[in-house]
Image (cartoon, helix red, strand yellow):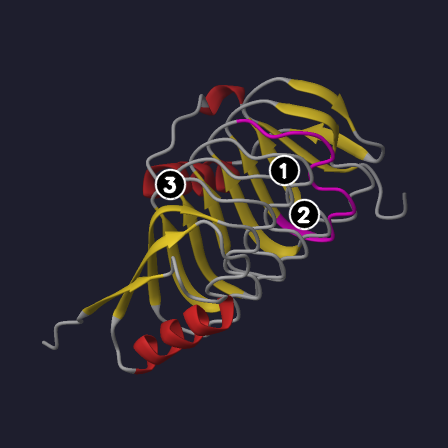
């Protein structure tokens, strides 16, 4: 069995181009990547097709944008637009994030253990976006497919003009969006929720979950 080596990259004095170049070089070498002092670089670890990246501490905006298959773990908080336009892979932020989490995602899994801001999973086309805490307004706006799990509360306009997909909400809802409705939780929904929450160590009341879906395919 070949043991992977860890490559620690201190981003404090690097430009975004230099940092991303070193990340890709380490992944090509088969190393697991550990990033430090990464909070001031926006767009780190973008467009990766493979590899494992761990951020020690906080990360900036657009972390893991255009992810195509890498596993990225942040041990602190992250900024806005994490996982923007993701295609595949996994991003897990163990703290809180800003607005725009998982916007325009085509696929992959994006998880936040804490809270997220406004505009989570807007224009989601097939990704799975999971928030262990609460979210802001306009979550799932124009959502075209995929799944969103919210273990806390949601603000205004949840699922506004959503076309396909499903949003699972455990907490309170300030106001629903146009063209969204609640329906019953099926056995396969419960199986998905249990497996997902267990994998990422998240807690929710399974009995309280509501499933929000489009009221019509032509809003």
Residue beneath the point at 61% across and 34% down: 117
In the rendered image, residue 202 lying in the magenta stretch gets the answer no
Q: Position of residue 47 (x, y in %)?
A: 52, 71
Q: Which residue is mark 3?
A: 76
Which type of secondary structure does the marked residue at label 1 adopt? strand
Residue 18 sits above or below residue 65 on the image: below
Give the mark count.
Answer: 3
Residue linked to disc 1: 167
Q: Is residue 102 above or below residue 23?
A: above
Find numbered disc 3 in the image and state the secondary structure of the residue it sits on. loop
Give the residues drawn in magenta, as a range. Answer: 134-146
Q: Position of residue 173 (x, y in %)?
A: 67, 20
Q: Residue at x 80, y 31 (%)?
A: 177
Mark 2 or mark 3, which has the lower sequence index?
3
| Label 2 close to label 1 by CB (< 8 Å) | yes
Secondary structure of the residue carrying tag 2 is loop
Crowding near the residue tagged with mark 2, few <14, some 14–19, many ≥20 C-alpha atoms within 10 Å: many
């Amino acid at each position: 069995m070949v043991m992977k080596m860890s490559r620690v990259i201190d981003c404090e004095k690097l430009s975004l181009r230099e940092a991303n170049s070193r990340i890709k070089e380490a992944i090509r070498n088969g190393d697991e990547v550990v990033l430090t002092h990464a909070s001031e670089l926006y767009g780190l670890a973008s467009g990766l097709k493979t590899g494992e990246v761990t951020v020690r501490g906080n990360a900036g905006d657009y972390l893991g944008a255009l992810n195509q298959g890498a596993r990225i773990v942040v041990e602190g908080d992250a900024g806005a637009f994490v996982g923007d336009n993701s295609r595949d892979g996994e991003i897990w932020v163990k703290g809180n994030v800003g607005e725009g989490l998982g916007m325009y995602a085509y696929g992959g899994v994006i998880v936040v253990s804490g809270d997220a801001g406004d505009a989570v999973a807007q224009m989601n086309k097939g990704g799975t976006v999971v928030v262990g805490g609460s979210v802001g307004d306009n979550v799932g706006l124009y959502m075209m497919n995929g799944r969103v799990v919210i273990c806390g509360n949601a603000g205004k306009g949840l699922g506004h003009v959503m076309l396909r997909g499903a949003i699972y909400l455990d907490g309170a809802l300030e106001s629903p969006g146009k063209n969204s409705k609640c329906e019953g939780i099926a056995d396969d929904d419960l199986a998905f929720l249990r497996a997902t929450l267990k994998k990422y160590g998240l807690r929710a009341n399974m009995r309280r979950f509501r499933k929000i879906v489009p009221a019509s395919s032509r809003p």
